[in-house]
Image (tube, rainbow, N blue to C red):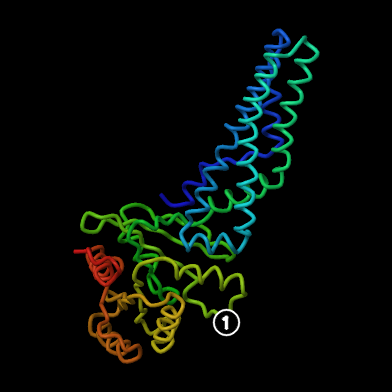
């Protein structure tokens, strides 16, 4: 499962929320010694139970894929987050230890006054350690919220990245090959979104990722944070399908589109790039073949495919070719 989906189920409490939970369940109308014992156990149980999501978040942070790690590191100091998790882990260990120590001291207490003193001391030591983690809990809460808002991409499944100039038909391609409505998620640090479609190809689930407005814009036009966010895309495994717009009124001319294709490769690193001329149904096969020849000359690629993004058969065939060219050697 992708980290974003996991993070959506993580609720990191604040110190005040833990304290409120304890107060709401404080035992009453029981003998002093038993009340103090139950109170100690209550504090220990609430601390352990309510901070368990922090341990889950710690494991999530430790195992982050480089794509997600790069994005998280733009907003958060990962070393600090690891320290925050350790602070809470220490509070959990102390709560366990104090429960074991003070319940036996309560059993040996001589009188109600001593029992109350021992109970207060034990509860105070447990809560004191957790109070030291107040800021840590706030940072971890924000980190979990941030990760939950990231694009939900499962790095264990095949991925195909779609690129090309504006209006080349990228969103149409993703929608056509997807078995359900593509998911749209905000891409952090930019005003753009990432579109993730899910296709079934040869009985296997494939994620088709469109990054409108990210890979069709020169890096020199971006600020440093935007560049780092786009650079994180290079950590996504899988081939790139670059769609070419062949119409005369295209947003970019063919030379500009070829330059964009090279720029995409520069951003995405050494990986297969499959170029496909879209809108064959609009311009006709003759014009599409002419554009394909020009793109070969301009980019140096050996083969350029022809495609109609609104045709499921046509779009799926290009998707299959991209998967065959990708890193999965086991793909049929």
Residue at the location (62% across, 29% down)?
46
Q: Residues within 10 Å of mark 1 (few under 14, many from 20)?
A: few
Residue furthest to the left: 332
Q: Nearer the viewer, residue 247 or 290?
A: 290
Residue 303 spot, x, y in % from top left: 25, 83
* Up/down of 159 relative to 121, above or below: below
Q: In this figure, which residue is indicated by the disc labeled 1? A: 220
Q: Quadrant of the C terminus?
A: bottom left
Residue pictured at 63% horizontal, 42% vertical: 88
Looking at the image, which is closer to me, 200 or 178? 200
Q: Most extreme residue toward the right, as rendered?
A: 113
> In the rendered image of this protein, does residue 310 appear above or below residue 128?
below
Horizontal and vertical percent position of residue 142? 63, 50
Q: Position of residue 211 (x, y in %)?
A: 45, 67
Tally the numbered discs: 1
Q: Residue at x 23, y 68 (%)?
A: 317
**Rendered image quadrant of residue 168:** bottom left
x%, y% of residue 42?
64, 23
């Amino acid at each position: 499962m992708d980290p974003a989906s996991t993070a959506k189920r993580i609720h990191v409490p604040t110190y005040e929320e833990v304290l409120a939970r304890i107060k709401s369940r404080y035992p009453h109308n029981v003998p002093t010694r038993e009340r103090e014992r139950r109170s100690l156990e209550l504090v220990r149980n609430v601390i352990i139970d309510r901070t368990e999501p922090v341990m889950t978040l710690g494991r999530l942070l430790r195992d982050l894929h480089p794509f997600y790690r790069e994005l998280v590191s733009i907003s958060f100091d990962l070393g600090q987050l690891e320290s925050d998790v350790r602070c809470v882990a220490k509070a959990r260990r102390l709560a366990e230890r104090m429960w074991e120590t003070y319940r036996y001291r309560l059993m040996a207490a001589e009188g109600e006054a001593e029992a109350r003193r021992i109970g207060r001391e034990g509860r105070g030591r447990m809560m004191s350690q957790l109070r030291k983690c107040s800021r840590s809990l706030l940072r971890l809460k924000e980190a979990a919220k941030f990760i939950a808002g990231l694009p939900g991409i499962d790095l264990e499944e095949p991925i195909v990245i779609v690129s090309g100039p504006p209006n080349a038909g990228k969103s149409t391609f993703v929608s056509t090959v997807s078995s359900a409505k593509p998911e749209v998620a905000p891409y952090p640090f930019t005003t753009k979104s990432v579109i993730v479609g899910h296709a079934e190809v040869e009985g296997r689930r494939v994620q088709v990722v469109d990054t409108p407005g990210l890979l069709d814009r020169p890096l020199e036009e971006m600020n440093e944070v935007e560049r780092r966010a786009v650079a994180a895309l290079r950590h996504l495994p899988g081939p790139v399908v670059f769609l070419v717009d062949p119409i005369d009124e295209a947003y970019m001319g063919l030379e500009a589109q070829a330059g964009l294709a090279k720029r995409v490769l520069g951003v995405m690193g050494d990986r297969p790039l499959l170029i496909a001329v879209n809108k064959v149904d609009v311009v006709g096969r003759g014009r599409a073949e002419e554009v394909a020849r020009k793109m070969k000359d301009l980019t140096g690629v050996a083969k350029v495919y022809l495609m109609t993004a609104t045709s499921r058969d046509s779009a799926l065939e290009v998707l299959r070719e991209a998967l065959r060219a990708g890193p999965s050697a086991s793909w049929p």
